[in-house]
Amino acid sequence: MKLNPLVAVIVGFALTACNYNHVKKENATMGGGLGKQEAMIAASLDYQSLNMAVMGPECLRCHSTPGGVQGGLNLETYQQVRANLSRIYYRSIEKRDMPSGGLGAAQYDLLKAWIEAGGPERNTGRGNARPIKGPINWPVIKNQVLKSSCLDCHRGANADAGLDFESLDVVRKNIGRIFDSAIVKQTMPLEPYGALTEAEKQALMKWISQGMPE
């Protein structure tokens, strides 16, 4: 049976990735994997998680309009927090004197990791190894691979580059371009979105190799 050139390339990548995953599993059994706390932090590097765990309960009682904007610092919005990252880092991470009494250990680790990641508004996916659930078909690819990394820009009548990735036909027609950008060169998605996770890459390659089933 003669393989489509793109499918042949993808099968080769898939075999290489399988070997890489086998090595990663061996490393994990020897103590090379993330600890539970690190994994939880990696899965929570977004502003909403930070706001719920740190900013809301620890900061907004003073640094908000209802709290009197103490020190002239208002931290009610992502934009306000993002504009004061260095100030927050100095007081809460280095000096550890804000809030009064300091942060709890988990709060400290989350805030430190979030700021050092650049203060992302959305989870970039880096270090997030959520498994892909369900059969590898179009709804799974759309909702578990493309939705978190691509559809914010490539959706609807005003989609970037005219590519509406909510459409199966559009994705099928541009699959070579998607494969090259997202898996081979990893130039997409653009910041602040991170590269696809290994699970997402594997699912996308499997879907393509199966003929992109609906």
Image: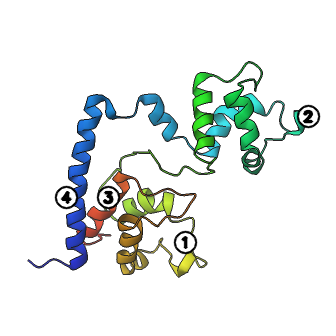
Give yes or no for contact between labels 2 and 1 (Cβ–Cβ under 8 Å).
Answer: no
Callout 1: SS: loop
The disc, 1 or 3, on the residue closer to the chain's N-terminal end is 1
Say which residue label 4 marks. Answer: 15
Say which residue label 1 marks. Answer: 155
The disc, 3 or 2, on the residue closer to the chain's N-terminal end is 2
Callout 2: SS: loop
Give yes or no for contact between labels 2 and 4 (Cβ–Cβ under 8 Å).
Answer: no
Where is residue 188 shown, x and y percent of the image?
A: 47, 66
What's the residue at 67%, 32% (across, down)?
Answer: 54
Q: Quadrant of residue 35?
A: top left
Which amino acid lies under the numbered mark 2 shown in the image of this protein?
Gly
The disc, 3 or 4, on the residue closer to the chain's N-terminal end is 4
Say which residue label 2 marks. Answer: 68
The disc, 2 or 1, on the residue closer to the chain's N-terminal end is 2
Residue 203 has which mark? 3
- Quadrant that contains the N terminus: bottom left
Give yes or no for contact between labels 3 and 2 (Cβ–Cβ under 8 Å).
Answer: no
Coloring scheme used: rainbow
Where is residue 101 shown, x and y percent of the image?
A: 74, 18
Determine the CA span between mark 2 and mark 1: 41 Å
What's the residue at 58%, 57% (across, down)?
Answer: 192
Q: Nearer the viewer, mark 2 or mark 4?
A: 4
Does 118 appear above or below 68? below
Q: Quadrant of residue 160?
A: bottom right
